[in-house]
């Protein structure tokens, strides 16, 4: 077992004791190791490098029409409560001589979502990254998320969700471009 897994397992065992449970109870004996492995997965975005995620899949292409990948499922952990939030991301861009492999867009979403996050920053990070690597005419990202920190505790509103957007370049400047993107993601 790696040092990271051992540390996370020890922390989990301490948490189980602190809340008043017996970590040696049959159902909990292996829980610290399972939680440690889960958190290693939840936080793998910290170990991801953008160059590896993109893996050279940026291509010169004389394309000027909008590219949209919608309904990208994501999950993340709220940095305020360390409770999950999850939902769908919709990403679009207007190429300016370069396109990115379509599968790389969900991979970029995953890279940033598998960190402690707030949805607002996550949305901006995805948009900014595509803007940096492609230098497109514009980028648009809309994320819709359900936050268990709002649903399980506090206001306890089970049917609520949050929408965030980041519009860069032509998507910010042109209401027509923005409207076209929003109509595509609402189909």
Image: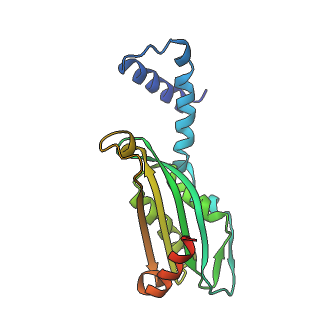
Q: Is residue 56 left or right of residue 161?
A: right
Count of numbered tags: 0
**Quadrant containing the N terminus in the rendered view:** top right
At which x and y percent is residue 106? 61, 61
Q: Position of residue 24 (x, y in %)?
A: 50, 12
Q: Nearer the viewer, residue 52 or 177?
A: 177
Q: Is residue 50 above or below residue 60?
A: above
Name the residue furthest front.
159
**In the figure, 137 relative to 85: above or below?**
below
Would residue 180 be found to the left or right of residue 167 on screen? right
Quadrant (top left, top right, bottom left, bottom right) of the C terminus:
bottom right
Q: Which quadrant of the figure has residue 83? A: top left
Q: Residue at x 53, y 30 (%)?
A: 35
Q: Is residue 104 left or right of residue 119?
A: right
Viewer-side residue, 77 vs 37: 77
Q: Position of residue 77 (x, y in %)?
A: 45, 46
| Picture layout, residue 111 above or below residue 96 | above
Q: Nearer the viewer, residue 137 or 91?
A: 91
Q: Nearer the viewer, residue 175 or 30?
A: 175
- Which residue is found at the position 61% from the left and 65% from the top? 105
Residue depicted at 54% across the width and 50% down the height: 45
Q: Quadrant of residue 54?
A: bottom right
Looking at the picture, how far across and down is residue 51, in whole percent?
A: 61, 62
The quarter of the picture where residue 168 lies is bottom left
Residue 3 visible to the viewer? no
Image: 174 above or below 110: below
Q: Is residue 144 in view?
A: yes
Display coloring: rainbow
Q: Residue furthest left?
A: 154
């Amino acid at each position: 077992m790696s040092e990271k897994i051992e540390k996370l397992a020890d922390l989990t065992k301490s948490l189980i004791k602190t809340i008043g449970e017996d970590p040696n109870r049959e159902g909990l004996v292996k829980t610290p190791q399972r939680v440690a492995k889960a958190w290693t997965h939840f936080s793998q975005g910290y170990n991801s490098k953008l160059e590896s995620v993109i893996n050279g899949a940026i291509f010169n292409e004389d394309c000027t029409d909008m590219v949209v990948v919608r309904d990208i499922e994501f999950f993340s952990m709220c940095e305020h409560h360390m409770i999950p939030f999850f939902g769908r991301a919709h990403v679009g861009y207007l190429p300016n001589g370069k396109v990115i492999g379509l599968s790389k867009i969900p991979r970029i979403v995953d890279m940033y979502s598998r960190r402690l996050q707030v949805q607002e920053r996550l949305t901006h990070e995805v948009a900014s990254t595509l803007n940096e690597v492609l230098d497109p005419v514009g980028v648009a990202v809309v994320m819709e998320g359900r936050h268990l920190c709002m649903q399980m505790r506090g206001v306890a509103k089970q049917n609520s969700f949050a929408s965030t957007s980041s519009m860069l370049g032509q998507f910010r400047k042109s209401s027509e471009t923005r409207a076209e993107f929003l109509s595509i993601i609402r189909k």
